[in-house]
Image: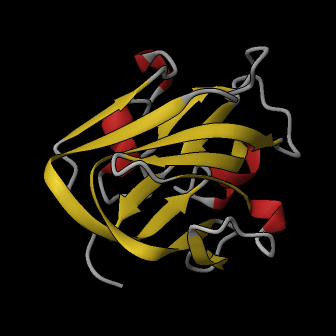
Amino acid sequence: FLPPKTAWEVSASTQVPKIWGTAQAFWGADGDIDTAWTVDATRKEGGVGDSLMLAFKAAVPVGLVRLVPGCARDAKAWDDNDRVRSIRVELGSGMRFELDRAQLDKLPPQVAAAGEFPIGEGPAKQVLILLRDRENVPWLRLTITGVEKSTTRSKIREVCVAEVSVH
C-alpha cells in the first residue's frame, strides 16, 4: 500500500510514565513498530477509553487505516502486554465507526474490508481497514474500546499501539 501520511502532531489522552520506557504518543505513529504509544494496563480501566490522535497540517486523503494493536518490538513484548481488541475510529471529516478484531466479519457500513495480517515471523499482527469511500481528513482519533488481556502476568503490563497510520 501507499506510504503513510505523516502526522503533523500526535497526542494522547494518557500514557505510561516516561520512566517505563517507550511511552510517548508520537511513537504510535512514527513508522517504527519497535516503539509504541503505551498506557498502563494495570489501571481499573485497563486502557479502555484512552485515545491517540493524529493531526495533519492540512486535510489528507485517506482510504486505508493501518493499526498495529500491541507491543510489536519482539515476541516477548507482544505476549507480555495487553493488546487492543476493539477500537472506535473518528475521522475529522465526520466519519465514525467501531471495529472489533474478534469480529472482522461484522464490518460497519463505512468499512469496505478489514483484515488482520502477520508482521514478519513472530506473533505480532497488523489490522488493515479499507474505507468504503476515500475521505479528506484533517485528523484521526483512535479510542480503545476493548482490550485483549495478555496470557502472561508480568508485574508491569501495558496496552500498546505500535503503529497507527493512514494511507
Residue 109: x percent and y percent? 64, 69
Residue 62 as seen in the image, left or right of residue 113: left
Q: Is residue 137 above or below residue 10?
A: below
Q: Nearer the viewer, residue 65 or 38?
A: 65
- The residue positioned 56% from the left and 79% from the top of the image is 120
Q: Nearer the viewer, residue 86 or 138?
A: 138
Q: Quadrant of residue 82?
A: top right
Residue 16 as seen in the image, left or right of residue 104: left
Q: Quadrant of the C terminus?
A: bottom left
Q: Quadrant of residue 39?
A: top right
Q: Quadrant of residue 125?
A: bottom right
- The residue positioned 54% from the left and 71% from the top of the image is 129
- The residue positioned 76% from the left and 40% from the top of the image is 146
- The residue positioned 47% from the left and 66% from the top of the image is 66
Q: Quadrant of the N terminus?
A: bottom left
Residue 166: x percent and y percent? 35, 63
Residue 130: x percent and y percent? 51, 76
Residue 25: x percent and y percent? 37, 33
Q: Nearer the viewer, residue 85 or 75?
A: 85
Residue 47 as seen in the image, left or right of residue 29: right
Residue 104 as seen in the image, left or right of residue 34: right
Q: How is the image coloured?
A: secondary structure
Q: Nearer the viewer, residue 116 or 91?
A: 91
- Which residue occupies the extreme left position in the image? 57
Q: Is residue 64 visible?
A: yes
Q: Is residue 6 above or below residue 57?
A: below
